[in-house]
Amino acid sequence: MSSAVLDTWQQFVEVGQLLFIGYLVHYVPYLLMERTLFLYHYLPALVFSILLLAADIELIGSIIQLQ
């Protein structure tokens, strides 16, 4: 693998870890609740999952462009 691909991967790992931790911070507390949960309980976690999806798409696009 080229150095540019490894740099892109390393950047993705750093961003992905931050976004995944943010997702877990907002999602896990509601897993522990036994009461009825509504959509607005999951919206902060949804924001992080959408950002993680955008990071995935950026990684794929960067790797395709570098090859």
Image (tube, rainbow, N blue to C red):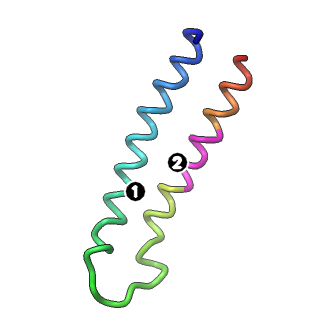
Residue at point 27%, 81% (across, down): 33
Query: Where is mark 1, residue-wise?
Result: 23
Would residue 33 be found to the left or right of residue 53 on screen?
A: left
Q: Regarding mark 1 in the picture, which secondary structure is present there?
A: helix
Would residue 22 be found to the left or right of residue 39 on screen?
A: left
The residue furthest front is 1
Give the spatial CA distance, label 2 vs label 1. 9 Å
Residue at point 58%, 12% (across, down): 1
Residue 54 shown in magenta? yes
Location of residue 28 in the rendering, given as x and y in whole percent from the top left corner: 31, 65
Location of residue 3 in the rendering, given as x and y in whole percent from the top left corner: 55, 9
Q: Which residues are magenta?
A: 50-57
Lower position in the chain sequence, tag 2 or tag 1: 1
Residue at point 44%, 72% (across, down): 42
Tag 1: amino acid: Tyr
Location of residue 20 in the rendering, given as x and y in whole percent from the top left corner: 40, 49
Q: Regarding mark 2 in the picture, which secondary structure is present there?
A: helix
Compared to residue 54, the image places residue 42 above or below, namely: below
- Quarter of the rendering occupied by the C terminus: top right
Q: Are marks 2 and 1 in contact (CB under 8 Å)?
A: yes
Question: Which image quadrant for residue 62?
Answer: top right
Tag 2: amino acid: Leu
What mark, if any, has residue 52 been given in the picture? Answer: 2
Location of residue 46 in the rendering, given as x and y in whole percent from the top left corner: 50, 63
Q: How many other residues sit within 10 Å of disc 2, few (<14), some (14-19) or many (≥20)?
A: many
What secondary structure is the stretch in magenta mostly built from?
Answer: helix
